[in-house]
Amino acid sequence: MPPHSSHLLQPLNVSCFSPLKRAYSREVESLMRNHINHITKLEFLPAFKIAFNRAFTPANICSAFRGAGLVPLQPEAVLSKVDVQLRTPTPPAALPEAP
């Protein structure tokens, strides 16, 4: 995968995992407002489930792949977003020999 292209070629990173992070943060803030300052395994799972269900909706998932040009497949759309140098790198210059 070309460098700096995961947000283009792995659309769930942007369309689902970023909203998941925000939704989970909101759930943690809610717990903190209820004076729960340390999240145990018992508090984590319900909070994560709520956040996951808010972020991973069928609409978000479909939108992610459509926006990336992966479904329906549009190779031109994908490649136009990736700025990749496809030429052979120039070999390093030869160092002068010492006398």
Image: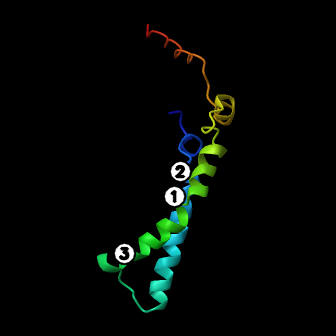
Work out whether 45 lies above or below 92.
below
Q: For the residue marked with disc 2, what is the amino acid?
A: Leu
Pinpoint residue 41: horizontal percent, then vertical percent: 30, 75
Q: Which residue is mark 1?
A: 17
Q: Residues within 10 Å of mark 1 (few under 14, many from 20)?
A: some
Q: Which mark is residue 44?
A: 3
Residue 5 bears which disc, if any? none
Task: Characterize the local packing of mark 2: few (<14), some (14-19) or many (20 or more) Cα atoms within 10 angstroms.
Answer: many
Whether pointer 2 and pointer 3 mark residues with C-beta atoms closer than 8 Å, the reply is no
* N-term-proximal mark, 1 vs 2: 2
The kind of residue on which mark 3 rests is Phe
Q: Secondary structure at mark 2?
A: helix
Sequence order check, earlier mark of 2 and 3: 2
State the residue in front, 9 or 4.
9
What separation in Å lies between label 1 and label 2 (alpha carbons)? 6 Å
Identity of the residue drawn at 67% across and 36% down: 81
The residue identified by callout 2 is 12
Tell whether 10 sits left or right of 36. Answer: right
In front of the other: 50 or 11: 50
- Residue 13 in the image, given as x and y percentages of width and height: 53, 51
The local secondary structure at tag 3 comes to helix
